[in-house]
Image (cartoon, helix red, strand yellow):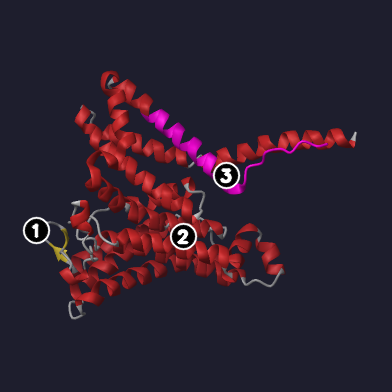
Amino acid sequence: MKKQKFELSKGGKDFLASIVAIAAGLLFGLIILLFSNARQAFPAFGMILKGGFTDGLSGLAQVFYLSTPIILTGLSVGFAFKTGLFNIGSSGQFTCGAFAAVYIGVKWTFLPGGVHWIVALIGALIAGAIWGMVPGILKAVANVNEVITSIMMNYIGMYLVNILIVKYVYDPIKSQSVPVAKSAIIPKLGLDKIFHSNNINISIFIAILAVILIYIVLNKTTFGYELKACGLSPEASRYAGINAKRNIILSMTIAGALSGLGGGLLYLAGSGKYLQVLDVLAPQGFNGISVALLGMSNPIGILFAGLFIGHITVGGNNIQLYNFVPEIVDIIISTIIYFGAFALLIKSLFDRFRRRPSEAAAVKEEK
């Protein structure tokens, strides 16, 4: 009688790989704290683990506020990755979407209050979609590597938005965009009173809705099946009659739209954040790459990975109470995110170690 071997499901392997990556990142962060200030290291590390829970409901509100844009950019990267594409242009798409939302929020004051913020978010979606579509077209038509083109589009988007800010929505005194109209601010629906914070609104629910929608598209529709088939095996997909070029363009367009929406949600939050005229790429786009890797490109995993990064960020900001300089905080958070990129490697190692006993047993049976 053969013994039944315990076998983890694909989702279980993904989850275990992410947990190991997070643990490795936290351990490395603790080592940095010990070298910096051994006496205060463990209390500060405890503060990081507490994260948003340290400040009660207002801390949770800050977690949701910081998590929302990187959940969307993580979805953007993860969606493209599921179709065999690496969307490293999320930062540029995020910036273009943010500008479109701010422009509509400032200039289109003729729109009714209940519609203005919705139109601004739609504008962000469209701007991000256009910025993502360009690398998709170049990939589909001329087989130009999407990593190269999307990196270029990041910088083109950054400089273009800087020019457009100065031309259309510029506050010369503060060197930033002017405030959007009140009608363009995303509704809070009383959440600010519940959580005792002005940073929270319904954006987190919009992000969750986007997660559910992308999950359904990828796993419950023919279109999603075709996209994933193209990512797994382009040659087999073409043989099966799937239009690979169309799917490449659509995949990058949808990915860009998600990043653009993330930019709109952040800058229409009414939290006092404005577009700056700086030659700096939006960090939310690159954080989205890490969130997608940590979440194994699974929409549900990306949601929790984004919330985790937001939680750690809030906790990291609080360790300045223990006399750690802000640069140490940035190093710790960056290290945790960096180790998230090794989740795929850890997963492949698990698969390799699981295969070795099976292969050995198969050889033994043949003998």
From the image, state whether disc 1 or disc 3 is nearer to you.
Answer: 3
* Residue 128 is one of the magenta-drawn residues: no
The N terminus, quarter of image: top right
Three-letter code for the amino acid on which mark 3 is drawn: Gly
Q: Residue furthest front?
A: 1
Q: With respect to residue 238, does 53 lie above or below?
A: above
Q: Give residue 352's position: percent from left, percent from top.
A: 67, 37
Q: Residue furthest left?
A: 173
**Distance (Cα) linking label 3 and label 2:** 35 Å
Identify the residue at image location x=46%, y=67%: 254
Picture quadrant where residue 364 is located: top right
Relative horizontal placement of residue 195, taking residue 291 as reference (left or right): left
- Residue that badge 1 annotates: 173
Three-letter code for the amino acid on which mark 2 is drawn: Thr
**Distance (Cα) linking label 1 and label 3:** 53 Å
Q: Residues within 10 Å of mark 1 (few under 14, many from 20)?
A: few
Identify the residue at image location x=87%, y=36%: 365
Which residue is nearer to you in this view: 246 or 305?
305
- Residue that badge 2 annotates: 149
Identify the residue at image location x=29%, y=62%: 202
Magenta range is 1-29
* Residue 17 is one of the magenta-drawn residues: yes
- Residue that badge 3 annotates: 12
Picture quadrant where residue 48 is located: top left
Q: Is residue 93 visible?
A: no
Q: Secondary structure at mark 3?
A: helix
Q: With respect to residue 367, does 196 lie above or below?
A: below
Picture quadrant where residue 322 is located: top left
